[in-house]
Amino acid sequence: MTSRSLLVAAVVLVAVASAAAHSALDRAEPRPGSRLRTSPPEVKVWFTERLEPAFSTLRVENAAGQRVDRADGHVDAADRTLMRVGLAPLSAGAYRVVWRVLSVDSHVTEGGFTFRIER
């Protein structure tokens, strides 16, 4: 392999490693796309990296885009990969969970998913 080929390979490996280091959704309760019979008391979302509490947000909206959570979204003190937000009892319908997080590696990621309450 030439030195130029080695340099290109090293740059590619660094880029792949950097992309993999960003915090991404690991799992959530309720699960994305789930259909529930009852309203959950809270939404919990786990990420692949530890989060910076001061710069991470989590909210739940109804189909009209109105916020329906208790506005208490926070990074869990015991597990900094976990965010929680409390919910008042939800009626039947579709809900969207939306997050914007800053991981300890200083990268911001955002996203969302939906779940439904069916009675």
Image: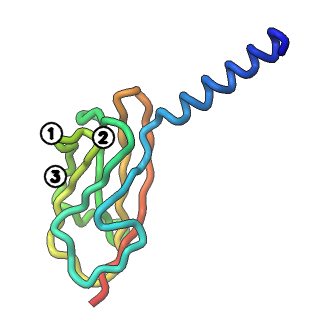
Q: Residues within 10 Å of mark 2 (few under 14, many from 20)?
A: some
Mark 1 or mark 2: whose residue is earlier in sequence: 2
Write down the quadrant of residue 78 in the picture.
top left
Q: Residues within 10 Å of mark 3 (few under 14, many from 20)?
A: few
Residue behind mark 3: 72
* Three-letter code for the amino acid on which mark 3 is drawn: Asp
How far apart marks 1 and 3 lie (CA) works out to 14 Å
Picture layout, residue 47 above or below residue 8: below
Mark 1 vs mark 3, foreground winner is 1
How far apart marks 2 and 3 lie (CA) works out to 12 Å
Assign a secondary structure to mark 2. loop
Q: Residue at x 55, y 34 (%)?
A: 19
Residue 67 location (% of width, % of height): 27, 63
Residue behind mark 2: 56
Mark 1 vs mark 2, foreground winner is 1
Residue 94 location (% of width, % of height): 36, 76
* Three-letter code for the amino acid on which mark 1 is drawn: Ala
Mark 1 or mark 3: whose residue is earlier in sequence: 3
Assign a secondary structure to mark 3. loop
Picture layout, residue 3 above or below residue 52: above
Residue behind mark 1: 77
Indicate the quadrant containing the C terminus: top left, top right, bottom left or bottom right.
Answer: bottom left
